[in-house]
Image: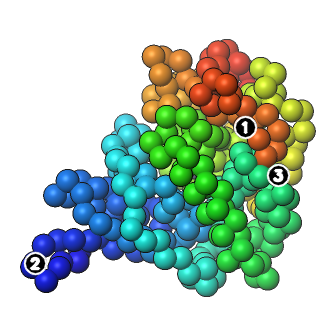
Amino acid sequence: MLSDELGRDTAVIALGGGVVGDLAGFVAATFMRGVAYVQIPTSLLAMIDASIGGKTGVDTAAGKNLVGAFHQPSVVISDPDVLRTLPPAHLRAGLAEAIKHGVIADAAYFDEVAEVAPHMAAGGSGVDLASLVAGSVRIKAEVVAGDEREHGRRKILNFGHTVGHAIEAGSDYALLHGEAIAIGMVLEAQLGERIGVTAGDVTTRLRHVAERAGLPTSMPVGLSADEILKRTRTDKKARRGVVEYALPSFVGEMAGSTSGWGIAVDERDVRAVLG
Ligand SMILES: [Zn+2]
């Protein structure tokens, strides 16, 4: 916490990964009804995703980020060299969000990420991390700038996260967020294919890139489809009991531009792809 010359608390500096940044951002959003804060993300996930867009929150027993606020940081300072000290599993997990950015908005970026995926799986040596971070930040910032409060297009950032969050919580957080999201994206792409909104090659391409990155792509052993289904119902994207999904049409383009970007899906279809 920083104070100004009059002793007023004026800023919170959030140094850390996604969870720390989210918590510090939430403190900044709510303390004295909001003080400025600076994000200094130290994980790939935080640099390319959590630190951009002003979503802050705390995880509770009921689920991830159900308590939160929108509060934009004054500054985000990312030093990609810090990522060289990350455990490889965390580097790979962060890449899941970069894969997502490619799918939702930029096919060329998706190909770039596919290119670096095997190197990330091996610890990231030789990868231009600054360019990777810049690519994702550009996409996420562009989406958020057009819809800060998530009334419309910002929903596309939820791709992979409805099923992914359910799997993450179902694993008791034994899976890293990015690992759960990788599985969630593959299953949600399958769901999109099943209901006829997603092109046939999306699941295959997604699975291929995730595998190259060393990320899991199928339901973890020991998790039941019914439990995951139940958890999707408490997802904050559920509206009046119907769970809405953000689903791709193609790699680089999301479906639902004429229906507010959220697609209501019959639970029987979700059940079918969960196996
Ligand atoms: Zn995420």
Q: Amino acid at mark 3?
A: Ala
Q: Amino acid at mark 1?
A: Met
Quadrant containing the N terminus in the rendered view: bottom left
Residue 213, quarter of picture: bottom right
Measured as percent of width and height from the top left, residue 226 is found at 59, 24
Residue 161, quarter of picture: top right
Query: Please, is residue 235 above or below residue 51 in the view?
Result: above
Secondary structure of residue under mark 1: strand
Q: Which residue is mark 2?
A: 7
Q: Which residue is mark 1?
A: 254
Q: Earlier in the sequence, mark 3 or mark 2?
A: 2
Q: Earlier in the sequence, mark 3 or mark 1?
A: 3
Secondary structure of residue under mark 2: loop
Q: Residue at x 82, y 44 (%)?
A: 251
Could one spot residue 227 in this view of the protein?
no
Farthest left residue? 6
